[in-house]
Image (spheres, grey):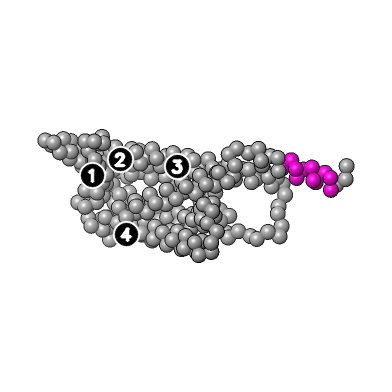
C-alpha cells in the first residue's frame, strides 16, 4: 500500500470517528454557549446586588434578607436561593462536561502532531481551559467562604438566622459583616481581585465563541455581540474586582 493510500485510509478513519461522536461537537458548543451566557447574566446581576455595599450594612443585609424571603410563604425560606443554586449547579456540570469533552476530543484528534501554517489563537483564547479550572476553584472557595461558612471562612463569620415575629419572617443575614470580614484578609482580597480579571478574560473570549456557536454570521451582529460581552466583562472586572480592595483599604468597613 502506498503512502498516499495509507494517509487516505487514516483520514477516512478520523472522519468516521467524528461522525460517530455523540453528542456532536456542535451540540456541545451550543451547550457551552447557552450555559456560559446564563452564568454571565447571573454574575452581572450578582455584581449589581454587591454594589449595595456602598449603601452600608443595613441596606446590604436587607437585600440579603429579601433574597431569602422572596415570595414567602409561597416559597420556603431561602427557596429562591435553592432554585438558583440548583439551576446554576446543572449549568456548571453541563458547561464543564461539554468543555472537557471538546478539549479531550481535540487532543485525541491531534495525537502527537502539531499543526503548522494555521492562524494562531490569541494568548487568552489558548488558556480557556486553565481559566475555567481557576474559576471552578473560585466557586468552591466562594461557597466555603461566604455561603457555607466552612473551611475557608473568616474567624468572624456569622451564619444567617431567621425567626417568625407574628406573621412576618425576620432575617438576621450578617451578609455585610461576613463579606467585610472575609475581604479584610489580604490573601482573600487579592485572590478575589485576580479571579475577577480571569473571569473578564473568560467572558470576553467566551462571548466571541458564543456568537459563532449560536450561528451569528453577519459582521455587524458579531461586532455588537462582541462589544456587549467585552463591556459586561469590563464592568464585572472593575466593580467586583474593586470591592475587595476597597474593603482591604478601609474605604468600605
Q: Secondary structure at mark 3?
A: helix
Report the residue marked by disc 1: 65
Q: CA distance from mark 3 to mark 4?
A: 31 Å
User: Which residue is depicted at the point 58% across and 46% down?
Assistant: 26
Badge nearest the viewer, 2 or 4: 2
Residue 11 can be seen, yes or no: yes
Q: Relative to 5, is 58 on the left or the right?
A: left
Which of the marked residues, 2 or 4, is nearer the chain's N terminus?
Answer: 2
Tell which of 113 and 12 is nearer to you.
Answer: 12
Q: Residue furthest right?
A: 1
x and y percent of residue 189 in the render? 37, 53
Main SS category, magenta section:
helix
Tag 2 or tag 3, which sits nearer the N-term?
Answer: 2
**Image coordinates for residue 75, horizontal then vertical, percent:** 26, 36
In percent of the image, x 68 and y 45: which residue is there? 109
Mark 3 vs 2: CB contact within 8 A: no
Residue receiving disc 2? 80
Reply yes or no: does residue 160 show up in magenta.
Answer: no
Q: In which image quadrant can residue 67 be found?
A: top left
Amino acid at each position: 500500500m502506498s503512502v498516499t493510500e495509507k494517509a487516505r485510509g487514516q483520514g477516512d478513519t478520523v472522519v468516521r470517528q467524528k461522525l460517530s461522536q455523540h453528542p456532536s461537537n456542535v451540540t456541545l458548543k451550543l451547550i457551552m454557549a447557552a450555559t456560559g451566557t446564563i452564568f454571565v447574566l447571573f454574575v452581572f446581576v450578582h455584581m449589581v446586588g454587591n454594589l449595595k455595599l456602598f449603601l452600608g450594612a443595613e441596606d446590604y443585609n436587607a437585600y440579603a434578607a429579601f433574597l431569602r424571603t422572596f415570595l414567602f410563604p409561597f416559597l420556603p425560606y431561602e427557596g429562591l436561593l435553592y432554585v438558583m443554586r440548583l439551576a446554576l449547579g446543572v449549568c456548571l456540570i453541563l458547561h464543564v462536561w461539554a468543555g472537557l469533552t471538546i478539549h479531550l476530543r481535540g487532543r485525541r484528534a491531534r495525537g502527537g502532531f502539531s499543526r503548522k501554517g494555521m492562524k494562531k489563537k490569541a494568548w487568552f483564547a489558548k488558556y480557556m481551559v486553565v481559566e475555567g479550572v481557576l474559576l471552578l476553584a473560585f466557586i468552591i472557595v466562594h461557597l466555603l467562604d461566604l455561603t457555607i461558612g466552612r473551611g475557608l471562612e473568616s474567624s468572624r463569620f456569622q451564619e444567617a438566622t431567621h425567626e417568625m415575629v407574628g406573621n412576618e419572617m425576620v432575617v438576621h443575614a450578617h451578609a455585610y459583616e461576613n463579606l467585610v470580614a472575609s475581604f479584610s484578609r489580604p490573601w482573600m482580597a487579592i485572590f478575589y481581585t485576580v479571579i475577577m480579571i480571569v473571569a473578564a478574560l473568560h467572558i470576553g473570549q467566551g462571548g466571541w465563541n458564543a456568537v459563532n456557536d449560536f450561528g451569528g454570521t453577519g459582521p455587524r451582529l458579531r461586532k455588537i455581540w462582541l462589544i456587549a460581552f467585552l463591556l459586561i466583562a469590563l464592568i464585572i472586572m472593575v466593580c467586583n474586582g474593586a470591592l475587595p480592595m476597597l474593603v482591604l483599604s478601609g474605604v468600605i468597613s
